[in-house]
Amino acid sequence: MKKQIRRLLSAAAGSLAALSLLTFPAAAARQFENCIPNVGVYDIQGVLSEQSLSQAAEKVQETSRDIDMYVAVCIVGPETAFYSDSDVESYADDRYDELFNPQDGTDTDGVLLLINNSTNYDYLSTSGTGQLYYYNGSSDDRTWQILENITPYLKDADYSGAIYRFCEDLKYYYEKGMPDDSYSYDNENDTYYYYQGGQLQSGEKLPWWFGVRWAMMLPVSAIIGVITALIAVLCVKSSYKLKKSLSPMNYVSQQDTHFYVQEDVFLRKHISKTHISSDSGRSGGGGGGGHSHMSSGGHSHGGGGHHR
C-alpha cells in the first residue's frame, strides 16, 4: 500500500516538473523590410538640435530592433493645427499607416508616439501585436502609464529625455510580455482582436477557450488526481477493518414519545421565474479588455492619449 502511494506521488511530482518547463512565447515581427528605414524620430516642429535628433533616432532604431516592431516618434507644434483630441488620434494613426502599413488588410506590429506641442495632448498609436504588448485595457493600461512617465520630461521641454524614457518603457513591457487574457475590441466594427498562433487574430467573438489558463489547469488537475487516488486507497483500506456491532438497545429511546398535529390554513404557493442569460460574450472595454478603432486607411489601431 505504501509503495502504491509513493508511486502516485512520484508521478505527480514528475508531471509538475515537466509542466514548469512549458513556455508560451509571443514574438512580433517587422513584416516589411522596406519600412524599416522609416523607423526613427520626425521632428516636424524643429525643437531638437541636429546632434540630439541623431542620438534620439539611434535610440529609437535600437529599440525597434530589440522588440522587433516598428517604432517612430513625431514631434509637432503650432504649425500643425488640431481642433479636437480626435483629430490628434486620427493624425497619429494615419501617420503610422503612412510609415509602416503599406499593404491593405495587413496590420504591422508597432507603435508611434505623437508628442503634440500644438494642443499638449500627446498620443500613442499602437498596431498589430503592439495593441497587446502596450495594452490600453482597464486592468493594465500600459499606454496611459507610458504617457504618464514621459509627461514630466515634456513639461520641462526635455524631448530627448522623453524619447529615451519612452524607449525604455517599450522594452520593459515587451520583456514583461502581453497581459494575461488581453484582447482588444473595436466597437465600430464589432470585432475582437486577440493573440493566437504567433499573430494577431480577429473575429466577431472571442474563442470559447480564450482566457483558460491551461498551464495552471494541468498541475491543478494532477494534484486533484493524486488526492482522489489517495482518498480511494484509504477508503478501500478502511473497508477491510472489522467494526464492532452496536447493541440494539442503542436505538431505543428512554424518553416518552409525543405526537403533534399542525395544519396550515389559507396557505398559498407562489413561484417566480427569472431568466438567466447563457451568453458568455464580453463587451468591449469590460473585464480588462482593451479598445481599438479603424484608421482612415482601414487599419486597426489601439492606443490612447494623455493631457499634460
Image (cartoon, grey):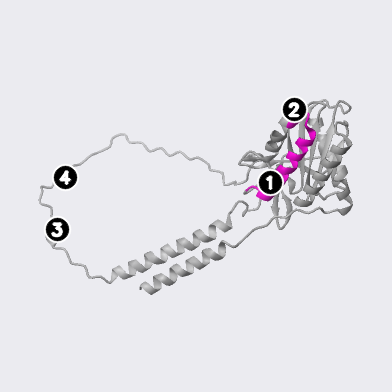
Whole-percent x, y for residue 64 in the image = 79, 48
Magenta stretch: includes residue 219? no
- Observer able to see residue 132: no
The residue drawn where x is 62% and y is 42% is: 288
Cα gap from disc 1 to disc 2, whole angstroms: 23 Å
Cα gap from disc 2 to disc 3, whole angstroms: 87 Å
Please state the extent of the stretch shown in magenta in the rendering.
153-179
> Are the residues tagged 3 and 1 within 8 Å (C-beta)?
no
Kind of residue at badge 4: Phe
Kind of residue at badge 3: Asn
Kind of residue at badge 1: Tyr
Labels 4 and 3: the sequence-earlier one: 3
**On residue 155, which mark appears?**
2
Whole-percent x, y for residue 125 in the image = 77, 39
Query: In front: 303, or 59?
Result: 59
Q: Quadrant of the N terminus?
A: bottom left
Cα gap from disc 1 to disc 4, whole angstroms: 77 Å
Q: Is residue 268 left or right of residue 53?
A: left
Q: Quadrant of the C terminus?
A: top right
Q: Pointer 3: what residue?
A: 250
Q: Is residue 81 left or right of residue 249?
A: right
> Are the residues tagged 4 and 3 within 8 Å (C-beta)?
no
Cα gap from disc 3 to disc 1, whole angstroms: 73 Å
Q: Nearer the viewer, mark 4 or mark 3?
A: 3
Kind of residue at badge 2: Lys
Labels 1 and 4: the sequence-earlier one: 1
Picture quadrant of residue 230: bottom left
